[in-house]
Image (spheres, rainbow, N blue to C red):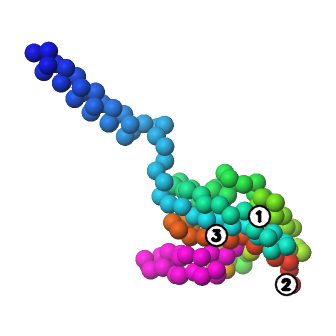
């Protein structure tokens, strides 16, 4: 009888722990993937080259903000409003004489389910619209205007 009662308690505790760990608000987010961040300064030197993990709640902007010192501004374009990255880590610009160019290696998903393969290509969208894709490399290059 004690053996049956002990087995029932162990079974109940196992089910309870599985339930609690599944619905806990303190549960760690599950990693969806990893990306590589590369930052190149005005001398052409790589000043940041790191792999970061991300989950479904992250955006590229939030991930950069979490791991680096960043400064950005919002501005109006002909197609709407967007954010411009002015500083990341030791690379700083003013967007009048210089800027940070964003290049992507990997792929970007399209709304029709297809994807665009990127090979060190300029990002077609601003920093706040770039999706996180597992395995992609996002490169931030200092550029002088007119160069």
Q: Residue furthest left?
A: 1
Rendered location of residue 49, percent (x, y) = 68, 64
Q: What separation in Å lies between label 3 and label 2 (alpha carbons)?
A: 21 Å
The stretch drawn in magenta includes residue 35: no
Q: In which quarter of the image is residue 77?
A: bottom right
Quarter of the image for the N terminus: give it. Answer: top left
Describe residue 67's horizontal placement relative to residue 113 as left or right: right
Q: Which of marks 3 and 1 is nearer the N terminus?
A: 1
Picture layout, residue 118 above or below residue 139: below
Q: Which mark is residue 47?
A: 1
The answer to whether residue 138 is seen in the rendering is yes
Residue 72 in sight from this viewpoint? no
* Residue bearing mark 2: 147
- Kindly report the distance in space between the C-alpha atoms of the residues bearing marks 3 and 1: 14 Å
Residue for badge 3: 138
Residue 95 in the figure: left or right of residue 39:
right
Question: Tag 1 or tag 2, which sits nearer the N-term?
Answer: 1
Left or right placement of residue 31 versus residue 43 in this view:
left
Q: Position of residue 91 (x, y in %)?
A: 81, 64
Instruction: Name the residue located 44 percent from the left edge and 80 percent from the top edge.
Output: 114
Residue 51 % position (x, y) = 60, 60
Residue range in magenta is 102-121
Query: Whole-percent x and y of residue 20?
Result: 36, 34
């Amino acid at each position: 009888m004690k053996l049956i009662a002990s087995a029932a308690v162990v079974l109940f505790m196992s089910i309870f722990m599985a339930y609690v760990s599944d619905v806990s608000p303190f549960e760690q987010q599950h990693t969806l993937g990893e990306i590589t961040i590369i930052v190149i300064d005005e001398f052409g030197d790589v000043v940041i080259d790191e792999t970061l993990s991300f989950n479904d709640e992250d955006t590229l902007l939030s991930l950069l903000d979490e791991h680096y010192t960043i400064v950005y501004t919002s501005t109006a374009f002909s197609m709407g409003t967007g954010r411009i990255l002015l500083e990341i880590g030791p690379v700083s610009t003013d967007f009048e004489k210089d800027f940070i160019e964003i290049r992507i290696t990997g792929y970007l998903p399209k709304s029709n389910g297809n994807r665009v393969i990127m090979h060190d290509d300029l990002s077609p969208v601003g920093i706040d619209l770039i999706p996180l894709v597992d395995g992609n490399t996002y490169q931030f290059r200092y550029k002088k205007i007119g160069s």
